[in-house]
């Protein structure tokens, strides 16, 4: 990853990695030269200790304005440190994805109905609680499905393209992993289950709160093995892959949210060296 190192004030420097991203990709902000945690930042960030230095995650929205974005941290003694990175435009191709027969078929009336249901589900998911006082995860993350020599990890549908049902266009704000029916689905890290329920569009869904506004969401499951309020560890089985809800076939859809913003999960994993 290319990194921009900001001008330092006293001993504190802000380092932002990567130094340039596409709309919808996350960045990692670290502060070097001090172990002191900032008391505030602009935009607001939640700092934690990672590899012995103050660290924060920032998610760019897929519709965020392109150009230079500046991050400023303020410390208890009033000193500040700032750094910048560049947001570049994302090319968003469009693919056809008709409403499946399991949801009533792809009539114009049903497309509108599905869009209404999707808006309600998105509003409910946007309200999912994430504790703000500390991070619950461990230092590293892991992919939600296993990768083997015979069955390597495969992304079948990437983040950021548009799905056209005919009358409506829905942006794909996650990644789809190849996962035959009944494939075990695992927690990407330690956290608390906030949601384990069935939605009309998203199907059987598990949402894990990793703390500090970080959520991971696992959708279209055929079976859920956890319950709300349950503490899970990294790699713990959450359920089995399926094709419930708005799905053309069995797979695992994974969404990662940072502070309410859905980011590219593959970019998120890359921040922690997971490839």
Image (cartoon, helix red, strand yellow):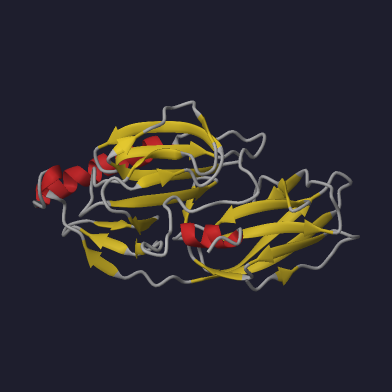
The answer to whether any part of residue 247 appears in the image is yes
Q: Where residue 19 sits: x, y (%)?
A: 64, 70
Vertical comparison of 178 with 192: above or below: below
Q: Is residue 129 visible?
A: no
Q: Nearer the viewer, residue 60 or 209?
A: 209
**Residue displayed at 20% across by 45% down:** 114
Residue at 35% x, 39% y is 205
**Relative to 52, residue 230 above or below:** above
Horizontal side of residue 94 vs 78, given as left or right: left
Q: Decide which of 237, 8 is in the foreground and name it.
A: 237
Number of marks in picture: 0
Q: For this rendering, which residue is in front, 39 or 36?
A: 36
| Quadrant of image for the N terminus | bottom right
Q: Which of the 4 quarters of the picture holds residue 137?
A: top right
Q: Is residue 218 left or right of residue 214?
A: left
* Residue at screen point 64% across, 68% down: 85
Q: Position of residue 254 (x, y in %)?
A: 40, 51
Direction from residue 29 to residue 146 in the image, left or right: left
Q: Residue at x 25, y 43 (%)?
A: 201
Image location of residue 162, percent across then percent down: 30, 63
Above or below: residue 59 compared with residue 66? above
Closest to the observer, 269 or 97 = 269
């Amino acid at each position: 990853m290319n990194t921009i190192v900001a001008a330092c004030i006293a001993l504190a420097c802000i380092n932002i990695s990567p130094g340039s991203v596409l709309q919808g990709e996350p960045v990692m902000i670290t502060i070097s030269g001090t172990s002191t945690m900032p008391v505030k930042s602009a935009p607001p960030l939640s700092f934690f200790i990672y590899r012995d230095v103050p660290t924060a995650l920032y998610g760019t929205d897929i519709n965020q304005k392109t150009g230079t974005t500046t991050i400023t941290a303020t410390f208890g003694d009033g000193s500040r440190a700032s750094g910048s990175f560049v947001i570049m435009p994302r090319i968003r191709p469009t693919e056809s994805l008709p409403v499946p027969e399991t949801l009533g078929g792809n009539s114009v009336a049903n497309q509108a109905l599905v869009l209404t249901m999707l808006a309600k589900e998105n509003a409910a998911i946007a309200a999912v609680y994430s504790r703000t006082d500390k991070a619950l995860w461990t230092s590293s993350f892991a992919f939600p499905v296993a990768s083997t020599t015979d069955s390597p990890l495969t992304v079948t549908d990437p983040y950021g393209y548009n799905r056209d049902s005919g009358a409506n266009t829905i942006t794909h704000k996650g990644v789809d992993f190849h996962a035959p029916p009944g494939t075990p689905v695992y927690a990407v890290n330690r956290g608390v289950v906030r949601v384990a329920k069935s939605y009309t569009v998203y199907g059987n869904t598990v949402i894990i709160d990793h703390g500090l506004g970080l959520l991971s969401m696992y959708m279209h499951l055929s079976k859920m093995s956890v319950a709300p309020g349950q503490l899970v560890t990294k790699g713990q089985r959450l359920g089995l892959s399926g094709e419930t809800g708005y799905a053309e076939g069995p797979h695992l859809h994974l969404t990662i949210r940072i502070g309410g913003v859905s980011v590219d999960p593959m970019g998120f994993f890359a921040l922690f060296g997971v490839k």
